Image (tube, rainbow, N blue to C red):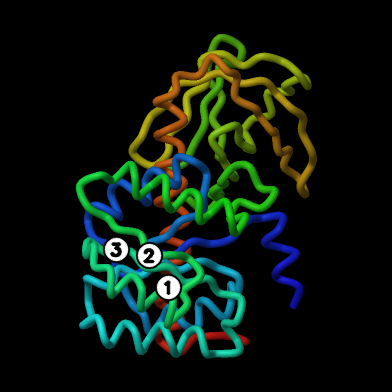
Amino acid sequence: MGSGNQSDILGKKIFFLYPSTAIQNEIVFELIQQEFEAYVVRDQNALVPLLKRYPDSLVFIDIDEALPEPDWEKWIRDVMADPALADIKVGIVSAREDEALMRKYIASVKVQGGYTVIKSDINKAIRQLLEILHVFDAKGRRRFLRATSENETLTTINIPYNNAYVNGVIKDISSTGLSCTFTEDPNLEKNSLCQDIQIKLQSTLLKLEGIVFGSRMDGLSKIYVVVFTQRIDPSVRVKIRKYIQGNIQAAIDAELKSLSRGGSKT
């Protein structure tokens, strides 16, 4: 299906199966901040058909959670033996610094994504996982994560216009810019600077400035592309990425739900 070529461009999906609180709150958060497309999954049965949709993903399994370790070994061997999942890369994460266990998964099960020990030194674990992700070119040529938000009524933009504010809807957003439409066309010129932009990402209100990169017509509405300037407070980008994380996770959760109901479409 040529998904390999697509992931070269768009990057690979990274799934953490039954991650501990530390993995979810610190490691997955940090990977998102570094623009990796990382997700949390808590259903190994629904994950299998999802992986068949994204057949060159990476999966990191926390073998301390959900199942006894021998059951995890069997599940992992089954996944790795499935011809439809031949391109999936599996890695282990665990708080157990057990030489025999590490040897088993690396030398016998032959997981390609290594065995990462998650203990008190979370930064060391993050560095190890980043090395693994770079080896597998997990980002591809995509540099920034993007969230599609046009169906969300709580994701809006306001810009100063004629001594008032004109309201708009954000269609998609990354940590570097957004596209949007306005209720009243402000006729923004290409390369014009928009200061005091207010964006609302659900309950988060952010102020920033951007430069109009251009516009295009989509049916009757004009879509503007705005690139954020370097003067944005770094904490604003952190909050944008956190919003993107919630947005893309919700989309994967919806896919998983449909697959667990048997709604898989081939």
Q: Amino acid at mark 1?
A: Ile
Q: Which residue is mark 1?
A: 106
Is 96 on the left-hand or right-hand side of 175? left
Whether residue 141 is visible, yes or no, is: yes
Q: Which mark is residue 19?
A: 3
Q: Amino acid at mark 2?
A: Tyr
Mark 1 neighbour class, 10 Å CA radius: few under 14, some 14 to 19, many 20 or more? some
Mark 3 neighbour class, 10 Å CA radius: few under 14, some 14 to 19, many 20 or more? many
Whichever of callouts 2 and 3 sits on the residue coming sooner in the sequence is 3
Q: Are marks 1 and 2 in contact (CB under 8 Å)?
A: yes
Whether residue 41 is visible, yes or no, is: no
Q: Position of residue 73 (x, y in %)?
A: 34, 84
Assign the N terminus to one quadrant of the image: bottom right
Is 148 on the left-hand or right-hand side of 44? right
At mark 2, the secondary structure is strand
In space, the residues marked 1 and 2 are separated at their CA atoms by 7 Å
* Residue at x-position 46% and y-position 30%: 237
Q: Which residue is mark 2?
A: 115
